[in-house]
């Protein structure tokens, strides 16, 4: 019995947005790694996978923005003061989201049966390194 993406339930009768579709695709990519998780842990695992899929797509969107607009912007408090560069809010959000994503992935990896753990760790860490 595989895990099923639960966001479909909230979209009955509606077309999914491109973003929702990307999140569902990421969920479907990760979920098979957890098919062997004990039945009593499946609800927790499903929620963690859905959150991890959301965070991954959010990170991709932040990365696109940062690649287009940079990590800093020019800021001036008043016309009388010189401007200076400061970190954009997107850069701060990206850094915080990366930390949350990595913590969530660690939680998920800890729930994988040992025999599947190595394969899952390799695949997930490949994404973190940008190889996927």
Image: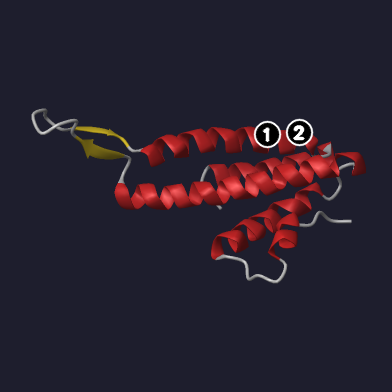
SS class, disc 1: helix
Report whether residue 60 is seen: yes
x then y, percent, for residue 7: 71, 57
Residue drawn at 66 percent across, 59 percent down: 24
Residue drawn at 15 percent across, 33 percent down: 83
Residue drawn at 69 percent across, 64 percent down: 11
Label 1 belongs to which residue? 106
x then y, percent, for residue 66: 37, 47
Residue 51's place in the image compared with 24, above or below, is above
- Whether label 2 touches label 1, CB < 8 Å: yes
Residue 74 in the figure: left or right of residue 88: left
Between 64 and 124, the one nearer to me in the picture: 64
Between 59 and 33, the one nearer to me in the picture: 59
Q: How is the image coloured?
A: secondary structure
Tell me the distance, in whole angstroms, between the alpha carbons under discs 2 and 1.
Answer: 6 Å
Residue drawn at 73 percent across, 38 percent down: 108
x then y, percent, for residue 87: 32, 34
Between 6 and 10, the one nearer to me in the picture: 10
Point out which mark residue 110 bears. Answer: 2
Which residue is most to the left? 80
SS class, disc 2: helix
Quadrant for residue 82, please give it. top left
Residue 81's place in the image compared with 63, above or below, is above
């Amino acid at each position: 019995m595989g895990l099923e993406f639960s966001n479909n339930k909230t979209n009955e009768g509606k077309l999914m947005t491109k973003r929702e579709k990307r999140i569902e695709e990421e969920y479907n990519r990760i979920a098979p790694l957890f098919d062997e998780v004990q039945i009593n842990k499946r609800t927790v695992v499903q929620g963690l996978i859905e959150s991890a899929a959301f965070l991954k797509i959010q990170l991709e969107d932040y990365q696109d923005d940062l690649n287009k607009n940079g990590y800093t912007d020019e800021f001036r408090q008043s016309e009388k003061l010189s401007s200076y560069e400061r970190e954009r809010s997107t850069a701060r959000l990206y850094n915080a989201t990366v930390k949350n994503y990595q913590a969530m992935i660690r939680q998920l990896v800890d729930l994988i049966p040992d025999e599947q753990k190595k394969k899952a760790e390799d695949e997930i860490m490949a994404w973190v390194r940008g190889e996927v």
